[in-house]
Image: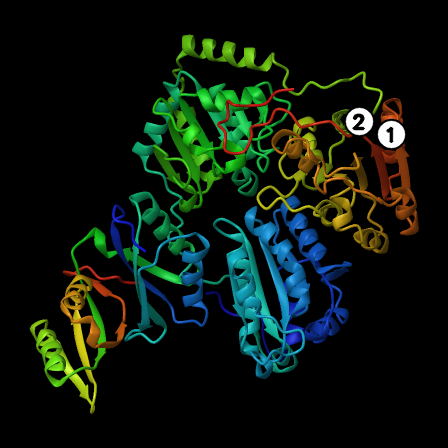
């Protein structure tokens, strides 16, 4: 649902690992009409917090408002707009394929070219795992023969800033 | 965190609730009992430090607590049961949220083992209140009750204030646990740097911008009221000698009778305030948020010629609707105090004298339009005249509070009653909740037993919480209700006249009750006033009845409209005038 002219932003948050914290963040986005391309959340090495990565899009003003509004949530400990500096992002893709042996192998080889690997094979299906940036995964998908695809599962991007700066709290 | 002031074992969760409130210094809790809160009510009954005020509908409990908070500077407290108790309270909570009122709402919940089972009177309170609270909690352990309530008060009353809900399952209230009510709490995800310090060079820049302004304007909102910054604001405005306007929420933040005051601005603001707002070259905005009822369409407001300085405690209020050139995040009282100090230390203030003379000339020209004029010789009662007389008769009293409902009467009260002090004007600005007027008056009267409390309302709004006449009787609250009865939902009717081809769809109220008899049936005094010549006498008579609630039903002109009016989506200078 991203509009062409609206730049993409990756926002990284640390929030209290409380029930309801996720719905506060998700609710904020829907209540104020902000875009969400993806949202991923999981605990970290500190069991009291969760780390969330939100990919959104919007003008400079809108994204500034998004970060201000997120900061106002009592459960949000700290956040950073990763897009403001250099950072890395990765997304995991799981894909289930079917088709003739050669079709499946073509898909597998394509995945391997992108650094992916075969995770499971049954009589008719392959499950392939692939990790990359969102655009790498998009590119892989665009080269794939869509008729072999049974299911696509993507996690959404996770990100972390480069260098010695950390999102500390 | 301080050392425990009280550390008691073997207290039930229910007993902890009144103890927390009492340790917090709460005098009144407004509420309504029900299954899930029965243990808490049982404990409330056993103590006498916290008084419970029984309302007739949970919505009114929250409104009354809200007005208690608005008129004091304390946190308002309400207590309701699970399920419908909570859903009834939602309107009150959302009203307080929109106007940044510090409140704690304690809600009963079904027992923890029944949560999620669609139990009797179960509702997902944390889920359903989430979008209209500053924060909310579900307490899952009896040992957490006291600390959670302490956190709720802390969050409600600091930063930009707001309502906080504490949901307590019934089984937690019957278990015994540890009670510990600390003097202060720290919340790592909340207690960030308060950002109240302004850098010296920012301070200098702002002051020099104000000093060099040719057409300055000072625009202040509810933030001045909540941060108690009225004295600092008065010093600053008078020191500069610049025009000042208040939002609906900000009335009383600057003295309404002061010559530098241009009246309220916005959709029904004065001509001079709106024109000055639109045409100024330096706008100093304090504790206000440029909302749609204040500036209309931001596109029509934007101007390259105008520099905006904005002081607000909430960073998200800055540059939200209008781009600000000089943002200052901080407590407005602190920042205004700093500015006053700076101005004082400078000794003399340089001003653009010639330009200012021109600017005031222009403002006085706008003033001479006399935008609030109305027909004073009318044979039917003009609602404006009622408010004007009410003001004249009470202006010399030290402690007068005015509450209102929502609609035309609210705007006339805001336009014609001059508020010289903060916290005297209590109304629903953001959410625009009809029905708040009477419960607001009750909350204010409890907080200020010796004050004159006036509720300016209309026959449509008052019926939305009319049942509270019963609460008023139970607690002997002698509020004065000024019902501007035009037999229409007046503001709806006005919009239909202006924008819907005079088709008055469902805005006429048939089958109105006889308000005099209705009031009398609740044990109060009712009056019906139909002639303009009787207004003053009736008001005097009612105001003299210090110990009674008096309901004054003024039968007013059905066709009167509120002027000026900025139609929705238009710019501030596109006012419809009388």
For the residue pair B84 and A49, the one nearer the viewer reads as B84
Does dot 1 land on a helix, a strand or a loop?
A: helix
Q: Is residue B465 left or right of residue B318?
A: right
The residue that appears at 10% across and 82% down in the rendered structure is: A102
Q: Tag 1 or tag 2, which sits nearer the N-term? A: 2
Residue B383: name its quadrant: top right
Q: Is residue A166 visible?
A: yes
Which residue is tagged 1?
B540
- Labels 2 and 1 share a subunit: yes
Q: CA distance from mark 2 to mark 1?
A: 7 Å
Relative image position of residue B390 (x, y in whole percent): 78, 29
Relative image position of residue B233 (x, y in whole percent): 52, 30
Q: Is residue A70 left or right of residue B476?
A: left
Categorize mark 1 by other alpha carbons within 10 Å: few (<14), some (14-19), many (20+). Answer: some
The numbered mark 1 sits on a residue in which chain?
B
CB-based contact (under 8 Å), mark 2 and mark 1: yes
Does dot 2 land on a helix, a strand or a loop?
A: helix
Residue B123's label in the rendered image is none
Which residue is tagged 2?
B393
From the viewer's perspective, is residue B131 above or below residue A154?
Answer: above
The numbered mark 2 sits on a residue in which chain?
B
From the viewer's perspective, is residue B365 above or below residue B227?
Answer: above
């Amino acid at each position: 649902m991203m509009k062409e002219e609206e730049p993409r932003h990756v926002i990284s948050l640390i929030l209290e690992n409380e029930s309801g914290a996720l719905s506060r963040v998700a609710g904020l986005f829907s209540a104020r009409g902000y875009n969400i391309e993806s949202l991923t959340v999981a605990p970290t090495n500190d069991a009291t917090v969760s780390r969330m990565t939100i990919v959104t899009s919007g003008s400079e003003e809108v994204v500034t408002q998004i970060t201000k509004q997120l900061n106002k949530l009592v459960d949000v400990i700290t956040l950073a707009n990763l897009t403001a500096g250099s950072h890395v992002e990765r997304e995991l893709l799981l894909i289930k394929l079917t088709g003739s042996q050669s079709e499946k192998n073509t898909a597998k080889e394509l995945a391997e070219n992108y650094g992916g690997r075969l995770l499971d094979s049954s009589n008719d299906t392959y499950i392939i795992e692939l990790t990359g940036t969102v655009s790498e995964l998009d590119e892989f998908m665009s080269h794939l023969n869509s008729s072999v695809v049974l299911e696509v599962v993507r996690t959404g991007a996770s990100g972390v800033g480069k260098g010695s700066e950390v999102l500390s709290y | 965190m301080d050392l425990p002031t009280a550390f008691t074992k073997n207290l039930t969760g229910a007993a902890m609730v009144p103890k927390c409130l009492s340790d917090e210094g709460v005098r009144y809790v407004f509420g309504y009992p029900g299954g899930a809160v029965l243990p808490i009510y049982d404990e409330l009954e056993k103590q006498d430090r916290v008084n419970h005020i029984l309302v007739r509908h949970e919505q009114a409990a929250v409104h009354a607590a809200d007005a208690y908070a608005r008129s004091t500077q304390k946190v308002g407290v309400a207590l309701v049961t699970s399920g419908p108790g909570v859903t009834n309270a939602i309107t009150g909570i959302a009203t307080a949220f929109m106007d940044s009122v510090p409140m704690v709402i304690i809600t009963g919940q079904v027992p923890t083992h029944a949560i999620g089972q669609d139990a009797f009177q179960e509702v997902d309170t944390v889920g359903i209140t989430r979008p209209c609270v500053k924060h909310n909690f579900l307490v899952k352990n009896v040992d957490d009750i006291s600390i959670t309530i302490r956190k709720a008060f802390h969050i409600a009353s600091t930063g930009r204030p707001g309502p906080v809900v504490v949901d307590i399952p019934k089984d937690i209230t019957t278990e015994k646990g540890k009670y510990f009510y600390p003097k202060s709490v720290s919340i790592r995800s909340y207690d960030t740097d308060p950002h109240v310090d302004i850098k010296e060079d920012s301070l200098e820049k702002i002051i020099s911008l104000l000093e060099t302004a040719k057409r300055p304007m000072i625009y202040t909102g509810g933030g001045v009221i909540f941060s108690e910054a009225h004295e600092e604001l008065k010093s600053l405005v008078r020191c500069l000698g610049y025009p000042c306007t208040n939002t609906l929420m900000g009335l009383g933040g600057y003295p309404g009778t002061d010559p530098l005051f241009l009246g309220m601005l916005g959709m029904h603001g004065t001509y001079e305030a709106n024109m000055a707002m639109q045409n100024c070259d330096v706008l100093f905005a304090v504790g206000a948020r440029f909302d749609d009822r204040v500036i209309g369409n931001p596109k029509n407001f934007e101007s390259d010629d105008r520099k905006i300085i904005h002081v607000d405690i909430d960073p998200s209020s800055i540059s939200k609707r209008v781009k600000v050139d000089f943002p200052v995040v901080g407590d407005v009282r602190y920042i205004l105090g700093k500015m006053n100090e700076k101005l004082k230390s400078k000794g003399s203030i340089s001003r653009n004298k010639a330009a200012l003379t021109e600017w005031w000339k222009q403002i006085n020209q706008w003033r001479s339009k006399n935008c609030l004029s109305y027909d004073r010789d009318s044979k039917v009662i003009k609602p404006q005249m009622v408010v004007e007389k009410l003001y004249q008769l009470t202006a010399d009293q030290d402690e007068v509070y005015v509450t209102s409902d929502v609609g035309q009467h609210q705007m006339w009260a805001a336009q014609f009653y001059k508020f010289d002090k903060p916290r005297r004007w209590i109304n629903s600005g953001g959410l625009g909740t009809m029905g708040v007027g009477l419960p607001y008056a009750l909350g204010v009267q409890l907080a200020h037993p010796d004050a004159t409390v006036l509720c300016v309302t209309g026959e449509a709004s008052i019926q939305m919480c009319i049942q509270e006449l019963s609460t008023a009787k139970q607690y002997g609250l002698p509020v004065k209700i000024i019902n501007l009865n035009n037999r229409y939902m007046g503001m709806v009717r006005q919009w239909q006249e202006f924008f819907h081809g005079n088709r008055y769809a469902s805005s006429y109220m048939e089958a109105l009750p006889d308000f005099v008899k209705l009031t009398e049936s609740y044990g109060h005094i009712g009056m019906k006033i139909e002639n303009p010549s009787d207004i003053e006498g009736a008001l005097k008579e009612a105001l003299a009845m210090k110990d009674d609630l008096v309901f004054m039903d003024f039968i007013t002109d059905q066709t009167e409209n509120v002027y000026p009016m900025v139609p929705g989506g238009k710019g501030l200078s596109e006012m419809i005038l009388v």
